[in-house]
Image (cartoon, rainbow, N blue to C red):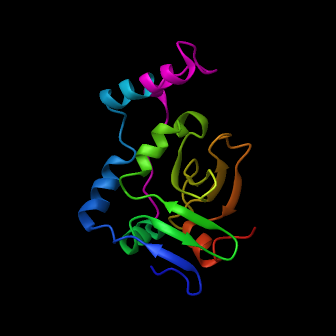
Amino acid sequence: MQWPPGLNAKPESPATDAEIAAFVESVFAPLTAQELEELHAEHRAIVGEGSFDPPFNPAIWPLPNRRLPESYLAFLQYSNGGSFSGDNRDFDPLFTTNQVRQYMLFYSIPHWMPLSAPIGFDGGGTFYLLDMRDDPIDGDYPVLFANACNLGYDEAVKLADSFSELIANKLGQP
């Protein structure tokens, strides 16, 4: 995959086959005991001993259990993260293979937007996410745009039917 011509691209080094294989295997794996402990500690630091409504229980968060789209994996083989801007949208940054799970857990995305996977920010605090709730269409998932401070499917905007469509359309419509 190449970034469309005429767009500002600051790609990172390509992800290796080993990095992509490790990413695919681990990104949606069940939470570890250490991750659960860290999430509970972060939660207590933010809201005290109170809880979310519904109760804060990362152990039951539904994580996507579907195959990542080939268009996204191909992009990671071109650039493992980086900053990119287009006519209408920016990816600043696109997450590396090591960052997707970190952002997913730190922002409690499985709590607020179950079965979505964050792939980047817009440079202004809004996530790009793969919506993996439904079966893929031609191996791909819709791309949603959701503010990190107001995560939820009701608030999210669908930008494209696939990652490759988002890129091909010079990062979507405003």
Q: Residue furthest top?
A: 49
Q: Residue at x 49, y 31 (%)?
A: 61
Q: Residue furthest bottom?
A: 5
Query: Does the magenta portion include 49?
Result: yes
When the figure is inspected, residue 148 is found, relative to residue 48, above or below; the finding is: below
Where is residue 127? Give x, y as percent: 59, 52
Of 135 and 87, nearer the camera is 87
When the figure is inspected, residue 65 is found, relative to residue 21, above or below; the finding is: above
- Magenta stretch bounds: 41-69
- Can the viewer see residue 64? no
When the figure is inspected, residue 59 is found, relative to residue 155, above or below; the finding is: above
Query: Does the magenta portion include 128?
Result: no
Q: Main secondary structure of the magenta part?
A: loop
Where is residue 149? Give x, y as percent: 65, 40
Locate the C terminus by quadrant.
Answer: bottom right
Horizontally, residue 154 falls left or right of residue 138, namely: right
- Can the viewer see residue 161? yes
Q: Residue at x 57, y 13 (%)?
A: 50
Q: Residue at x 64, y 77 (%)?
A: 170
Where is residue 78? Give x, y as percent: 39, 75
Where is residue 93? Give x, y as percent: 51, 61
Of 22 and 41, nearer the camera is 41
Locate the N terminus by quadrant.
Answer: bottom left
